[in-house]
Structure formats: C-alpha cells, structure tokens
Image (cartoon, coloured by chain):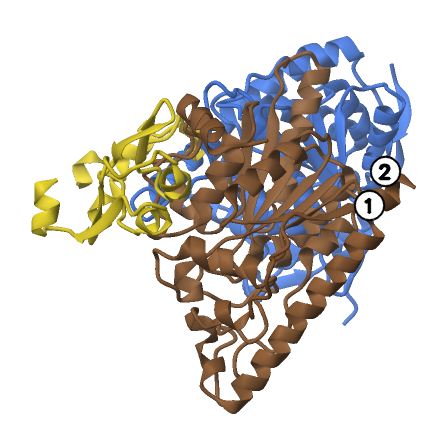
Amino acid sequence: MRKTMTGHKAVAEAMRQIEPHVVAVYPITPQSEIAEYYAEYVHDGIVRTELVAVESEHSAMSACVGAAAAGARVMTATASQGLALMVEILYIAASMRLPIVMALANRALSGPINIHCDHSDAYLARDAGAVQIFTESAQEAYDYTLIAQRIAEHKDVRLPVIVNLDGFTLTHSVQVVEPLEDARAKGYVGDFSPNYPLLDVDHPSTWGPFAMPDYYFELKRGQQAGIEAVPPVFLAAQKDYAELAGRPYEGFLEPYRLEDAERALVVMGSTAGSAKETVDALRADGEKVGLLKVRLYRPFPYTAIADALAHVDRVAVLDRALSFGTYGALYSDVATALLHRERKPILMNYIYGLGGRDTTPQQLDQVLREMKSGDPDQGLRYIGLRE
Amino acid sequence: MAAKLKGWKDLPMGGVVPGGATPELNKTGSWRAERPIWNEEKCIQCLQCWLHCPDDSIMIKEQKMTGMDYDHCKGCGVCAGICPVDAIDMVPEGSAACARR
Amino acid sequence: MANIKTLAKKQEQQVRLSSGHSLCAGCAEPMVVRTVLNSIDDPVVVANATGCLEVATSRYPGTAWNVPWIHSAFENAAATIAGVEAAYKGLLRAGKLERKVRFVAFAGDGGTYDIGLQALSGALERGHDFLYVCINNEAYMNTGVQRSSATPRCASATTSPVGDAIPGKPQDRKDLTEIVVAHHIPYVAQASVSNLIDLSNKVERAMAYDGPKFLNVLTTCPLGWRTRKDTSIPMAKLAVETRYWPLYEVVEGVYKINYKPKKHVPVEEWLKQQGRFRHLFKSPEGKSSLEEFQASVDENWERLLKKEQCLSGADAAQ
C-alpha cells in the first residue's frame, strides 16, 4: 500500500519490520528521527528490541559489536560526526565480520560545522571494510535497508552494511513510499544464525584477539574475501527483493539513457533524480546524454562501471565531497575501473553540493553542455561555487 | 616454525579463536630463571600459593596441592613469598637442587 | 562467604583463565581475574579493554580464556559488555535463550579512569546488569608506564619523569571510586590483590544485585612500580595497611570500611620499596613531598571515616 512518509520514517519502518534484537543509537541531525521513531516502537511495545540509548556514537558501535558478537541481530544509524566517532569501531566490526546494518543520513563533516548533506561522511568510512549502498529516494532507502540485512547476514559476507541516504533531501522530505506488508518483509529478511556467539557459553570463543605480524596479514586477507563475496550476494538479494516487491532493481548501477550516450554523468544519491530530469530535457533537444547512478559503492563494481561507460566519449564524475589533495573519491574509482580498457571516455571531475549547497537541473545542464569541449586536464571543477 | 603457520583460507571467520584455552601453545616455563621447589612434608595445604600464582602453575586436586606445572611457571617467586611455612624454595635453574627434583 | 577451598573447587570445575598467557612474571592481574571469575557460579561472558591483560591472554591463534571473551578497543569495554548484555536481554525476550548468564568487564586504570570513563559512566547510568572490574595498577603499563589519572602524586612515570624542574607527577590521582558512587549504582567497592578473599566476598555480594556493579582493585605491577617480582602481594598489602588504599564498599549508598588497620603505618613504608618513588628519599624537597603525601593519605582516610559515619547502615535505617 502506498503511503506518504519521510526518508526517516521509511528507514524506521524497515527497521520495525526487521525487529532486530538490539538497536544501539545516539541522536545526531539529520538522523535523529530514525532513533526517535524506533524508540517510540520500543516504548509502545510494538517491537521487542532492546534499545540501548548510548552516550555517544562510539559506544553505539561498540555496543553493536558486543551485541552482534553475542549472537544478536543488531542495527544502528548515524550521520557525519557520529560516523567519524564510530569509525574506529566500524573497522573492528568489519574485521570481526559482524553483520550490523546501519542507515547513514549523509551530512557534511566539520569543520566548519554544518548539518546539511554531502558525502564526506560516507567517504570517511570507505576503507573501513563495510559494504556501502547509496539510495536515491525514500523508497530506495526503505527497500535497501531490507536488502542490506540479507547481504550483511549472508554466510560468505558477514559484514556491516551502510545504507546511505542524503541528509534532509531524503531524510526530511515527504515522499510516496510503498512498504511491504510486515509478514512479507520479515519473510524476505529471514532468520539469522550467528557464528561463534558469545552467548553460546558451552562453546567459549575468543573474539578480538591480538594478532602479531605472523597472522595479521592473513586475517586481513580473510576479511578481503568477505567483501569480495558481496557482488553475487548483492545481485541475488536485490533480485529476490525486486521480484517480491515489484521493483525495477537490477545490477550494481542504474544506467539512464546511457546506451547511445556520447556524454554522461556519474552520480550517487538523490542528485540522480535531478540529473535524470536534465538528461530528459537535453535528450528532447537532441543531445546524446545519459547518466550512470552508482548503487553499490563498496565493494566498488569496477567491471560493471567500465562496461557501462567504455562506449561513452566524455564522462563527468560528480563527487559530493573533496578528497583534499587529490581527485574526488568516486572519480578516482571510476578512473581505475576504466584504466585498462582500450576504448575509454575522457573523464572530468566535478565537485558539487558541499554542506547542503543545492545543485539544480540547470547547473547539471550546464555541466553536460560544457563538458562537450572542456579540457580534461583542468583538474577539479566546481558546480555552483562562487569565485 | 614458519611451516606450522596457517594460510588465510584456513583461519576461522572474523579472527575468532573458537574453543577454549590453548596453554599448550605458550609454554612460559622457558622464561624461568629460578625454580620453585615444593617441600610436601612442610606443606600445610593452605593453598595460598595456588590462590596467588599468576600462572595457574600450582596444580591442585580435590582442593589439595599436588605439584608444580613447570611448563608454565615463570619462576616469579610469589608462591615462595606467600607461603606461611616456607615450604617452597626458589633455586636457580640448572643448579644441583634443581636437578634432584 | 568465600574461602580458599570453595574458590579452588570452582576452579577445578572450570579453569576460566588458564596458564599460557604472557603477562610478566609476578604480575598480579591474573590473581584478580581468577578470583573474580571463581567467585561467580553462573556462566560468564567477559569483555576486556585493550591493555596488558588483553594482549597477553589473546595472542592469535592462541587464547588463555575458557569463557566467552571479547576485546574490541581500549575505551569501550563498558559499552561492549553493555552490548553483550543487551543482546542477552533481546534474545531472552525473543525466546532464543533461557540460561542465566552474567557479564564482567575487565579494564585497566587507563581504560577506566581516562579513555574509557565516558563509556563506563554511560553504561552505569543506563543500568546494564554487569560487573566492571578496574584492574588498577596506577599507570599505562602496557605501553611502557606512562602516567594516567590513577597515578599517585610524585610517582615517576615515563610521561611524568623525575626531572630537575618537575620531580614526577605533580597532580593527585582522581578518586574514581567516588565518581562511580555518584552514579548511585547498587554496589561499588575498592579491593586489593593482597586481600583476595575480601575481593571474592565483594564479588559475591555484588553479583547478588541486578544492575551495574563496580570494583576498583589495586593490582601490583612490578615493572611499573619498580618492585621485586616476588613481592607483588606484600606491596599491595602495604598499600592497604598504610591506609593509602582503603578497602571499602558502598552498598546501596551505605558506606562500609571493610578493614581498618589497627596501627598507623606511615605511607613511607610503602613508598620506599618502590622505584617509582625513590627520588623522594634523596632530597630535602622529597622529604616535604613525603609529608604532603602522608597528609593527603590521612585526609582521605578521615574523609572516608566521616562518610562511613554519615552514610552508615545505622543512619540509613533511621
């Protein structure tokens, strides 16, 4: 049944249907309403979850680690500085192969302090070992929270999964969302059987031991196998869900009017919506332009990216964060994906939307027009920045 | 030594060490410079040495001391110090007193 | 009430922390850990902060633990055990568990007084059902004897060395036990590795309560205190006899000093046997520092006596 709701509510609804044993969460704008909705469910007796209203995000992730190692299904949510505080323990959660699903309401990192959207928080955690998915709408945020649970708990994966949704743009705007019925959502997510749970007291396990140079490397290689196992698991979980819910989800990426495109944008998150409008408008003018939206950001789908873009003449990769001293993080990944292709597009890197700066369809239109002749060696370009 | 180390595919997921303690992997008795020698005749079975041994190297059975675990005893001498009846002597490793034992 | 035989009996059933760890010869930490764990009848899950105990008992692929054990970082033992306990409650509610399980966190003074204080305070305030044991050896021993906020005044540590300008640590230690008392949890106590039966009794009394329990256990470090490795117990005992480290408990807000030394032993007797205080005995400035140290010990003891008088069981009953 279609309903109108915010992105917050959509994520909280998915969490209510998953009904994890433990939610450990700390408030931060623009994530707080997720915590508030979930607290209401707990206090109204709608879910049996043990809510741990921790005193910091560091403790949120630490409690998630303890709870997940104990054998519980565990979720959290955060944004920006909260993720920055969590990130120490997020690395550990990934190394312990703990399937903690979390919403990240993307918000710019300080300083200066800012509460609005960009992707600097997601980029901060990109090497942590967590799976990362970007969503374009409240519907996708809901859907991929359920899908993330299946990916995280797959026996070959067992990793934290971050579901990114743009702060305010998605978290606070009211959109039409069609949730699954509770029973179908629960059926899709299924049961969870943990590895070596601490609460199996008759079979004691040592979690988080001290590894010296003789084993550290091998343990990290084992962790790499976990994230390498994600792509087929992602596709299967997404396919099952798409069939169940009647959604058009397919692949790691969403190409839009890209087949015969001469120029294309690569984006993640809600900006894909505006970009589609721009592409439609330019197509109506006879311009051969297209769009590639990245859904699965970690592990990065290198081959799929190269396959999708190799035929395009010019590609503008849009990064919603600076990676100081080098190109944007998404640009660098896309460039790496195309490096060994014989035919490859000219690549340009645009930085946009920092700290919640609006990016309009007109600005994207301008990008698609100027990139026709722009000098690829110019380095970073900025959208909507005052000189 | 290197041959005994496992490859990455053989390690349990998540760096977990399943199962209980593995004292056999770390025989700390090799650290010892002095050896505690237990004089059973003097011993009053108060178990103070057992209670205070940092290395669980005072062996007990049915709440009575039965001997020393020299595989793990580091020779700290806490047991000899705490013993109320001087029933434990510390002797240099390799000495004659040690050999008689 | 605990006695040595019941502890031994418990250990014969299950050696919860085994030999084969790499703590220093004469380290007092395992005595504390074994006594605590042998004083709990139910199955236990242990969380351990980063530190000597963690590093020395969990070298991959080995372990010295026969109970479920988790380490994740330095500052989060309380949050980690809170998560384990929350999982237990959540799984009980979901009908996935039945057995009674208890939860214990071990952390050093650095992981408790300093970097882990926020996580500890949060877990205490939220009321998780767990026992937190601070194994207090009064400095960051695992990283090479740097000063912590548990390090006593004047002590030499590698980040408060005895220099010509500043001789050792200028500040007093923090009174963490009283900070924990201020959380109004059911059970708080100070104990010492020199009084293990007292420690065991405290664990038994603590575990009778649901909710957070806290023990601050003075634990000799021969390396950091610069004492002989065979004197770990007598050194801790002197800390108690000189009233430097009072054994007391606060049960539901009621103070009780568990041991009152009959005669006044000057704190010098404890200090002079430790290398970290050696400089105090070599100069006139040292002599005045010793007097100040003694005055501070006396003042703390008097304050504790007054608390016991004011907040005693008798008063509470009135």
Q: Please tell me which residue is depicted at 67% across the width and 19% down the height of the picture.
A: C91
Tally the numbered discs.
2
- What is chain A's hue in the picture? blue
Which chain appears brown? C
User: Which chain did the image draw in yellow?
Assistant: B
Chain of the residue on which disc 2 is drawn:
A
Q: Which residue is mark 1?
A: A30
Residue C24 at x, y = what percent? 35, 53
Circle 2: element type:
helix
Nearer the observer, C196 or A236: C196
Pointers 2 and 1 in contact (C-beta within 8 Å): yes
Q: Position of residue A57 (x, y in %)?
A: 70, 46
Q: Amino acid at mark 1?
A: Pro
At mark 1, the secondary structure is loop
Q: Which residue is mark 2?
A: A33
Q: Residue at x 62, y 50 (%)?
A: C259
Q: Amino acid at mark 2?
A: Glu
Residue at image location 78% in from the left, 19% down from the top: A48
Q: Is residue C168 placed above or below B20 in the rendered structure?
A: below
